[in-house]
Image (cartoon, helix red, strand yellow):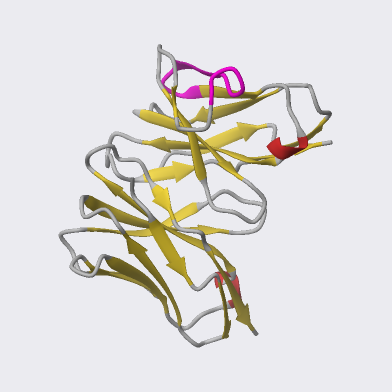
C-alpha cells in the first residue's frame, strides 16, 4: 500500500516568514495530493490539493508543488500569520481505490 | 463543500460500555468514511460506510467492535463497542461528494475518553 512520509514533525517560524512542509510517497499510481489543516479541537480542513498532471498550484499565501519523478510534494506558506498555527497533514491517493494515505502531521507554530 | 455535523462532540465513558456516534451531512454524498485519530497521531481509516449494505473495514478493524450503519445518502453511525481506555480517540466522519470524486471533507470529530 501507499506510504506517505512527512517532515518536519514540528516547525516554528517567526510571523511574516515562510513555512515549508515536505512529503514523500511510495506508490507511483498516486495521482491526488491534498493538504489538510487541523486546528485544536476541530476536524481536518482541506486547504489545497494538487493532481499529478500539475506541477504547482497557488491559492493566495499557500502553494503546493509536486515532483512526480522524485515522488515528493511540498506545502509552502508565505507571510505566515498567527492563525496559520495548526497541525498540517499531507495525503495521497490513487484512482485505483481513492483511499487517502496520510502523513504523520506537522505542528506549525507561528511566533508573533 | 458539504457541511458535516457529528453528535456527540465529546463524551466520557466507562470501560465496557458502548457509544454510538452520529454523522449528518447537509447534502447527498457518494461515499462516507469513519476515521480514528489517536492523541497526537495521524488519521487512520476504520471503514467505508456503504449505503444499504455492510461497511467495508480496513485491516485491524472489525464489525463486532465498530458496527456501522448507513441508512441513506446523508447519515451514518459508528458504534464503539465494549470500550477500553485504548479506544480513547477522536472519531471523524468524512465524505466525498459527487462533484469531485477526489475531494474529501471531514466533520468536526467526536472526542471520546474512556475511563
Q: Is residue A97 above or below residue A76?
A: above
Q: Indicate left or right for A26 with B52 as reference.
A: left
Q: Quadrant of residue B85?
A: top right
Image spot of residue B4 (x, y percent)? 52, 37
Q: Is residue A38 above or below residue B102?
A: below
User: Residue sitting at 44 percent across and 20 percent down?
Assistant: B55
Q: Nearer the viewer, residue B77 or B74?
A: B77
User: Residue sitting at 72 percent across and 22 percent down?
Assistant: B82
User: Which quarter shows the N terminus of chain B?
Assistant: top left
Q: Quadrant of residue B51?
A: top left
Image spot of residue B72 (x, y percent)? 44, 16
The residue stretch that appears in magenta: B62-75
User: Residue sitting at 44 percent across and 65 percent down?
Assistant: A6
Image spot of residue A104 (x, y percent)? 51, 59
Q: Indicate left or right for A94 with B61 as reference.
A: left
User: Which quarter shows the C terminus of chain B?
Assistant: top right
Is residue A11 highlighted in magenta? no
Q: Nearer the viewer, residue A40 or A102?
A: A102
Q: Is residue A27 above or below residue B81?
A: below
Image spot of residue A82 (x, y percent)? 60, 76
User: Residue sitting at 37 percent across and 54 percent down?
Assistant: A3
Q: Is residue B50 visible?
A: yes
- Residue lying at the far left of the rendered structure: A53
Callout count = 0
Q: Is residue B112 visible?
A: no
Q: Quadrant of residue A70?
A: bottom left
Q: Indicate left or right for B70 with B30 as reference.
A: right
Amino acid at each position: 500500500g501507499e506510504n506517505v512520509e512527512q517532515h518536519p514533525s514540528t516547525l516554528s517560524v517567526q510571523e511574516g516568514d515562510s513555512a515549508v512542509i515536505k512529503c514523500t510517497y511510495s506508490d507511483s499510481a498516486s495521482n491526488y495530493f491534498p493538504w489538510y489543516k487541523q486546528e485544536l479541537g476541530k476536524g481536518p480542513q482541506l486547504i489545497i490539493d494538487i493532481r499529478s498532471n500539475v506541477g504547482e498550484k497557488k491559492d493566495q499565501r499557500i502553494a503546493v508543488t509536486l515532483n512526480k519523478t522524485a515522488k515528493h510534494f511540498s506545502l509552502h506558506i508565505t507571510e505566515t500569520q498567527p492563525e496559520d498555527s495548526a497541525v498540517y497533514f499531507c495525503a495521497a491517493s490513487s484512482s485505483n481505490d481513492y483511499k487517502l494515505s496520510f502523513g504523520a502531521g506537522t505542528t506549525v507554530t507561528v511566533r508573533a | 463543500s458539504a457541511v458535516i455535523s457529528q453528535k456527540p462532540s465529546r463524551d466520557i465513558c466507562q470501560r465496557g460500555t458502548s457509544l454510538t456516534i452520529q454523522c449528518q451531512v447537509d447534502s447527498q454524498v457518494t461515499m462516507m468514511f469513519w476515521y480514528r485519530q489517536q492523541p497526537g497521531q495521524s488519521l487512520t481509516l476504520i471503514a467505508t460506510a456503504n449505503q444499504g449494505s455492510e461497511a467495508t473495514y480496513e485491516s485491524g478493524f472489525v464489525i463486532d467492535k465498530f458496527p456501522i450503519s448507513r441508512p441513506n445518502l446523508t447519515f451514518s453511525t459508528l458504534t464503539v463497542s465494549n470500550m477500553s481506555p485504548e479506544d480513547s480517540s477522536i472519531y471523524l466522519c468524512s465524505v466525498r461528494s459527487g462533484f469531485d470524486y477526489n475531494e474529501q471533507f471531514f466533520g468536526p470529530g467526536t472526542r471520546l475518553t474512556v475511563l
